[in-house]
Image (tube, grey):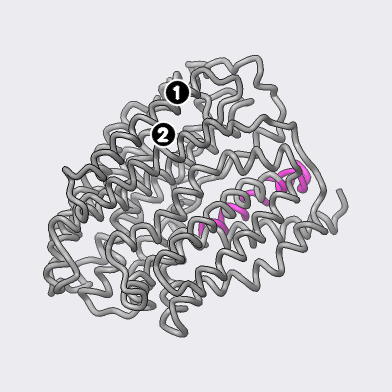
Amino acid sequence: MSASTTRWTFFVTTLAAFMVSLDNLVVTTALPEIRTSLGAGISDLEWTVNAYTLTFGVLLLTGAALGERFGRRRILGIGIALFTVSSALAALAPNIETLITARAVQGVGGAMILPLTLTLLSNAVAPERRGAALGIWGAVSGLGVAFGPLIGGAVVDGWAWQWIFWINVPVGILLAPLALTRLSPERGKAQRLDLPGLGLVTAGLFGVVWGLVRGNTAGWGSLEVVGSLVAGAIVTTLFVVWEMRSEHPMLPLRLFRSRGFAASNVTAMLFSFGMFGSIFLLAQFLQTVQGSGPFEAGLKMLPWTAMPMIVAPLAGPLSDRIGGRPLLVVGLLLQAAGLAWLAGNMSADTPYSTQWPAFVISGIGMALFFVPIANVVLGSVPQSDTGVASGANNAIREIGGVFGVAVLAAVFSHTGSYASPQDYADGTSIATWVGAGVVLAGAIAALFVPGLKRQAADPAPAADPAQAADPSPAVAGAVPEPVPA
């Protein structure tokens, strides 16, 4: 591959990954403005966040498989174009329903972009430089998530909330043609698409989330809510049955025979549940109750979201020496302690001076979680399964965030409201206590992750013969853990 192609691949993939990662949290500091501008309620704001996260998480593995089957640069270019168009539609949204729909399409585009940026970059760089290139890719993706609230707040303060979506448009217009013309026209080993599995998991998760979001509005005993929750649970169960019997599953359930893989994914889901659900409410608390502007709110959250950029380089070598389990357990305990601190010191007149130490503690805990989780997951499966294992872990984390926002917002709606600062503080306090409890449960789950000696002694479960040890598809689904994603 020519040096020119390598340089173009590095530029396109890192900038595209930053754009997609940014939209994970960029909307959080704009939520109060969106609520006022479009007359949205708490359930509408939930869907503004979850519509993106749900489609992104569910389709991550499918986006990677599409690239292997139809060509990586082609699917990447299509994904960038889709993300760009949907960003423009979100910016032009005249009502909350249009915004939610555009966010869902954004998630589809993001799922086509992120895994393929990693695959294309990995194959474009010489083996001796691959580690450095992928490290930069991961750092850029992490910056997109870490600085999402700050960038979103600055944009909303300087212009209007619509501009958090408009900023994607010129970037997408630049990147889409470059992806289609400057990148190598490679494709990996063609993979069969598990369309029935995709349909079942999408319908099942949507049903459960819909019931959680609508519970306080329609009534938890209503036919709509009970029917949605029951139907979602049944369809999700059918997805599990289908994946157990499918010859080409999107999520090979045999991987969960590994204690390390199962425990680390349960841990990751519970972490994302508590973290994303709490950020959804706390970002609004800083504005709705404390009166901060969007940019100021983003600055105030920086000790939490940016702390991993400082701690991760120090914790990485420690993880190599003592293994991932101690860092996971301590990190989650710190995250739970930070959330409990916030929940216990929350009222209409709570000063920021009592909150920032909790943000720092939570940020350190988040860093200690993200440093080892990828290695723990990949170390628990055969080499030929590392791609699908990493992709599955990322999808499970995203889905954990979806349920976190849905459940904690439901708790907030039941105990608080936007009627007054104190009402909002009361609801957020109880919801954040729930978030802290869920993260604490994640720390308990992390105790079941094998230790360093056990991981070295226990061989990973054997791969199915049908899983060829082809390095290209193995990378396709892999998305190193951004900070946070």
User: Residue 105 bears which disc, if any?
Assistant: none
Q: In terms of image quadrants, where is residue 232?
A: top left
Instruction: Give the crowd class for mark 1: few <14, some 14-19, many >=20 residues within 10 Å.
Output: some
Spatial CA distance of label 2 from label 1 is 9 Å
Whether residue 298 is visible, yes or no, is: yes
Instruction: Give the crowd class for mark 2: few <14, some 14-19, many >=20 residues within 10 Å.
Output: many
Question: Going by the image, does 355 lie left or right of 330?
Answer: left
- The magenta-colored residue range is 120-142
Q: Which residue is outermost to the front?
A: 223
Task: Report which residue position mark 2 lands on.
Answer: 265
Q: Which residue is outermost to the bottom?
A: 158
Magenta residue check for 140? yes
At a point 20% along the width and 48% down the height, the residue shown is 434
The foreground one among 442 and 94 is 94
Query: Where residue 174 sits in the image (x, y, percent)?
Result: 71, 69
At a point 49% along the width and 56% down the height, the residue shown is 104
Magenta residue check for 403? no
The foreground one among 139 and 290 is 290
Query: Where residue 198 sits in the image (x, y, percent)?
Result: 52, 36
Task: Report which residue position mark 1 lands on.
Answer: 256
Looking at the rendered structure, the secondary structure element under dot 1 is helix
From the image, give the main secondary structure of the stretch colored magenta: helix
Kindly identify the amino acid type of the residue bearing the numbered disc 2. Asn
The answer to whether mark 2 and mark 1 are in CB contact below 8 A is yes
Whether residue 453 is visible, yes or no, is: no
At a point 72% along the width and 47% down the height, the residue shown is 120
